[in-house]
Amino acid sequence: MSEHVYLITIGLPLATVLLIFGMKYFAAIQQAKARLASDEAYRQLAAQAAAAQIETAAALAAIHGHLAEVKTRVAAVEKVLRDVE
């Protein structure tokens, strides 16, 4: 019986040390997974921001084209009004 007690006395601290290191590495793995998920969320957010920027640039170009057309028309109206005077 005393041999069993001796083996348990030696085995439990060793098992405890192994369990602590196992939990430490498990926590590191979980942190890495969480970091990866966070990085993926930031990548998606950046992709959405880039798409929104492209759409905004296209809308701005369309507005610029319409503004140029309006400027041309206003210049033509001003010319007609000067000719009438």
Image (tube, rainbow, N blue to C red):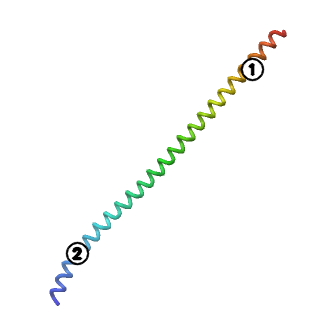
Numbered badge on residue 60:
none
Callout 2 crowding tier (Cα within 10 Å): few <14, some 14–19, many ≥20: few
- What residue sits right under mark 2 in the picture? 13
Secondary element type, mark 1? helix
Q: Is residue 5 above or below residue 19?
A: below
Which residue corresponds to the image point at 31% horizontal and 64% vertical from the top-left? Answer: 24
> Foreground: 9 or 28?
28
- Choose top left, top right, bottom left or bottom right for residue 77: top right
Which residue corresponds to the image point at 18% horizontal and 78% vertical from the top-left? Answer: 10
Which quarter of the image is occupied by the N terminus? Answer: bottom left
Badge 2 amino acid: Pro
Image location of residue 14, percent across then percent down = 22, 73
- Tell whether 54 sits left or right of 15: right
Q: Is residue 76 above or below residue 45?
A: above
Q: Label 2 vs label 1: CA separation?
A: 89 Å
Secondary element type, mark 2? helix
- What residue sits right under mark 1 in the picture? 73
Badge 1 amino acid: Arg
Q: Nearer the viewer, mark 2 or mark 1?
A: 1
Which residue corresponds to the image point at 21% horizontal and 82% vertical from the top-left? Answer: 8
Callout 1 crowding tier (Cα within 10 Å): few <14, some 14–19, many ≥20: few
- Tell whether 28 sits left or right of 49: left
